[in-house]
Image (cartoon, rainbow, N blue to C red):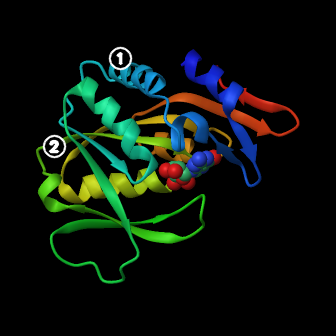
Amino acid sequence: MELLKQRIRKDGKIKEGNILKVDSFLNHQLDINLFEAIGMEFKRRFEGEEITKILTIEASGIAIACIVARYFNVPVVFAKKTQTKNIAGDVYTSKVESFTHGKVYDIIVSKEFLKSEDKILIIDDFLANGKALLGLGQLVKDAGATLVGAGIVIEKGFQVGGEIIRESGIRLESLAIIDEMSVEDGIKFRD
Ligand code: 5GP
């Protein structure tokens, strides 16, 4: 998605530890016009697929998922992050290792909001090592729902997540894939 790539080039900030900061338009201040274009692009890519719900993870996935959901006219469910040791009751849960914070946390979704008849599109801002996406995929599986695919705004193609997800057979659509990134040479996108 050219518009997105241009914006990443212009406003993305490369930080230590292979972190790309996009706080001025995607993760902190939100450029809603860009979000609209992102929503439209995911709609185009998943055109013709039956989707009943968008699933994402708090916090930064939520805003994007909401705009995408407008295009599919379906609800958004977001997995909550929790550090509670014993999670019991009417929730699906899985573990996710955070790339940015290095911690392992549980994610939960109420069983009320994920049903076996659901056809799920997962949306998230970044794909790095794939842990968040795999954790969300596990919730979908546990619910007996169908995973239609995953839509990622920025895939860091030099990390293992993309390969793991594609090899697992999940349909993955990333709007911008970064193949190389360094302070000295800037950002190189995959065509
Ligand atoms: P993964 O689970 O694929 O290793 O990492 C994906 C999650 O980590 C995303 O939900 C995102 O919030 C965060 N993340 C990974 N890499 C980056 C990055 O370079 N920049 C930002 N802002 N978040 C990232």
In the rendered view, would you say 127 is above or below 135?
A: above
Q: Residues within 10 Å of mark 2 (few under 14, many from 20)?
A: many
State left or right for residue 74 relative to residue 30. Answer: left
**Real-space Cα distance between discs 2 and 1?**
21 Å
The residue under label 2 is 118
Which percent across, then down, holds residue 12? 68, 35
The residue under label 1 is 44
Residue at figure coordinates x 26%, y 28% from the top left = 70
Query: What is the quadrant of residue 134 in the picture?
Result: bottom left
Which percent across, then down, holds residue 103? 55, 70
Name the kind of residue labelled 2 in the image: Asp
Query: What is the quadrant of residue 112 in the picture?
Result: bottom left
Q: Residues within 10 Å of mark 1 (few under 14, many from 20)?
A: few
Residue at figure coordinates x 74%, y 28% from the top left = 188
Which percent across, then down, holds residue 93? 30, 67
Name the kind of residue labelled 1 in the image: Arg
Which percent across, then down, holds residue 110? 19, 62
Which of the marked residues, 2 or 1, is nearer the chain's N terminus?
1
Callout 1 secondary element: helix
Residue nearest the viewer, comparing 124 with 26: 26
